[in-house]
Image: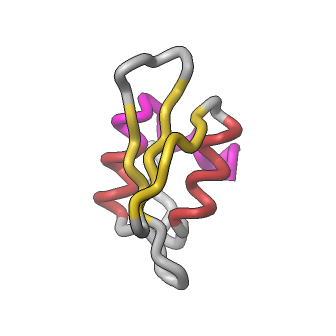
Amino acid sequence: MSKLPRDVPGDQLIRALARAGWYQNHQVGSHVTLRHNEKPGKKLVIPVHPGRSLKPKILQRILREAELTIERPKELL
């Protein structure tokens, strides 16, 4: 099993998730909400803080909620 990448900023993760079919629904402050057409009722909240990477536990939670494996975002990044 691969390890999570350590230096993934929120905006880069949003671009990677967009390639997987997620789209930006709205933004409140520094938190962006993503939705997916094929997964109604499911949403992801991504913190986007300039110059800061996502913590590994937050990245892991987002990937689990998006139902993606660790390898899939590495391909999309």
- Name which quarter of the figure residue 75 lies in: top right
Task: Out of 5 and 35, give the one closest to the viewer.
Answer: 35
Give the residue drawn at x 35%, y 50%: 60
Locate residue 31, reporting x and y percent.
40, 60
Region in magenta: 63-77
Give the residue drawn at x 53%, y 72%: 7
Locate residue 35, reporting x and y percent.
49, 33
Q: In the rendered view, how is the structure colored?
A: secondary structure
Compared with 61, 36 (above or below) is above
Asked if residue 74 lies in the magenta stretch, the reply is yes
Left or right: where 62 falls relative to 17: left
Compared with 67, 34 (above or below) is below
Give the residue drawn at x 62%, y 61%: 12
Compared with 11, 34 (above or below) is above
Task: Out of 5 and 59, give the one closest to the viewer.
Answer: 59
Q: Magenta stretch mostly in which secondary structure?
A: helix
Query: Could you tell me which quadrant the N terminus lies in?
Result: top left
Task: Out of 23 and 6, give the one closest to the viewer.
Answer: 23
Locate residue 22, reporting x and y percent.
58, 34
- Name which quarter of the figure residue 3 lies in: bottom left
Locate residue 25, reporting x and y percent.
51, 40
Compared with 7, 58 (above or below) is above
Left or right: where 65 falls relative to 6: left
Asked if residue 25 lies in the magenta stretch, the reply is no
- Name which quarter of the figure residue 42 lies in: top left
Left or right: where 50 falls relative to 29: right
Give the residue drawn at x 46%, y 76%: 49
